[in-house]
Amino acid sequence: MSRTALKCGLVIVTDRNAITRALLRAMEENGGVLVFTDPTIVQRTFCQQGEPFGLCPDQLYPYGPTLGQGDELWRASAMKAMNGEPGCPVDEGISYVTGIDDQGQEVAISFDLALDCFGQTLVGLERVKNWPYAKIFSNRYDIPNHFHLTEEDAISVGLEGSKWESYLLLEELMLRSLDSPRMFPAGLYEHIGPDDVAQFLLDKNWGQPKWDARALSPAHLVRPGQGAHMPPGVPHAPTGQTPFFELMEKRDHFIMISGFQDKIITPEGLRWRHLLAEQQGWDDKRKAEFVAHRIDYVASKKCFRRNNMLEPIPDTDNNGNGVRDGVSLRWGIYGMLGGQERYSAKLWRLEAGASVKLSGPPLVSWVLDGSISFGKKTLANSRVFGTQDRIFDLGLKTEGAEIILQNNGPAHASGVMWFGPNSHGNKMPSYFGQKN
């Protein structure tokens, strides 16, 4: 059996045959559930951590102080973070699951290798390539205004495809830091065009306080429990000072258009990080105009609140009116995105002693509050979030498994579960923007 370094105190297994055996044993022992190890920390050179969400002080700079602070925790991720700075680990961003080796010991397996070796059994063959990942980010300030590439632009520079992403403002996290209204800049004002955006990208303006690109985007009040879809090509600057849950396609590309925000200068290269080699040699003005035209101006000027904001919807199909026998299930992220079912998420809450049967498509369940049984495993989260707590216990219900999610008390438990593409079909509700 091929073994390498340690992950969370567990030996990492890389041999494909050993991985398959270890995953099979873990699934059998846990009744169709795989448990993830601790979340992987991702540093960003343009970020400073805001509201703490379970990191110890020595985890603020896990890969060194030159790479920014660790303000993102990635979950159920089978992809590497596209940072690329010297000093970033080769597996930055990739999650690990626990398996059981031939000697009956727990081992760690990277989630990308698990899907590659055993994906049909874990999440279904049609979902392996595009299994979504989630993150919790908590930045001290607003994230610099940026956008993600459309399908056409991503493929033109050798990337796999577009990046849709969606947000959930989880009450369990947000209420801890909600001492003032949260405003989320997104989209573009009606009068903004490519020439206006290009001005923010010029060398002479980059990093200057006057050229804070949030000036391009209207801000929207966001409240606990709400969600939002972010289409490719739409500028946005997610609000700081409160933890966000984010679910997205298996991509990590982005282009910054704000060189200065809240005392932070964005690294210059993030303007041009997705240009072809010949375009890298263009002059400053030509590059700025090219990047400015990568924005989807039609989508960016539609009323963001009306077209993209989400309110929780009771899951009437699976749970009556959404609350029954102490069980509450609500759709938090839903709808067809660009004509496809790319991912979705539900919020769950169980009163003491309540349980719900989970069958059908594979899903990841994350415990926000309380202690639950998930299949044959116990996942827990402290009610008082301390810096030493593992507050992100996470498990994967595999394809075809039928398990019970149960709260053994003494108080309520709550969390979020998310699904990969093509999981619900016509059972999933729509949102206004997919009809417009």
Image (cartoon, rainbow, N blue to C red):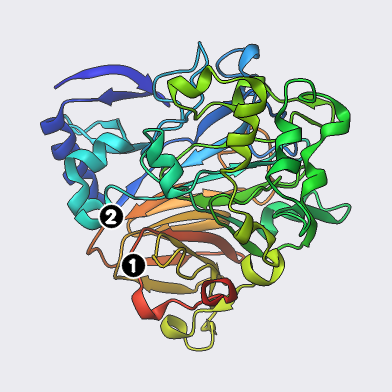
Give neighbour class at mark 2: few <14, some 14-19, many 20+ (Cα, 10 Å). Answer: many
Name the foreground residue: 320 vs 135.
135
Q: Which quadrant of the structure image shows residue 268?
A: top right
Of labels 1 and 2, earlier in sequence is 2
Residue 278 x, y percent position in the rendering: 45, 20
Give neighbour class at mark 1: few <14, some 14-19, many 20+ (Cα, 10 Å). Answer: some
Disc 2, SS: helix
Q: Is residue 28 visible in this depiction of the protein?
A: no
Left or right for 147, reference 100 = right
Residue 84 x, y percent position in the rendering: 48, 20
Q: Is residue 426 visible in this depiction of the protein?
A: yes
For label 2, the residue is: 127
Disc 1, SS: loop
Left or right for 64, reference 400 = right
For label 1, the residue is: 423
Q: Please state which amino acid type lies under the numbered disc 2.
A: Arg
Left or right for 99, reference 312 = left
Residue 276 position (above or below residue 170): above
Residue 280 position (above or below residue 334): above
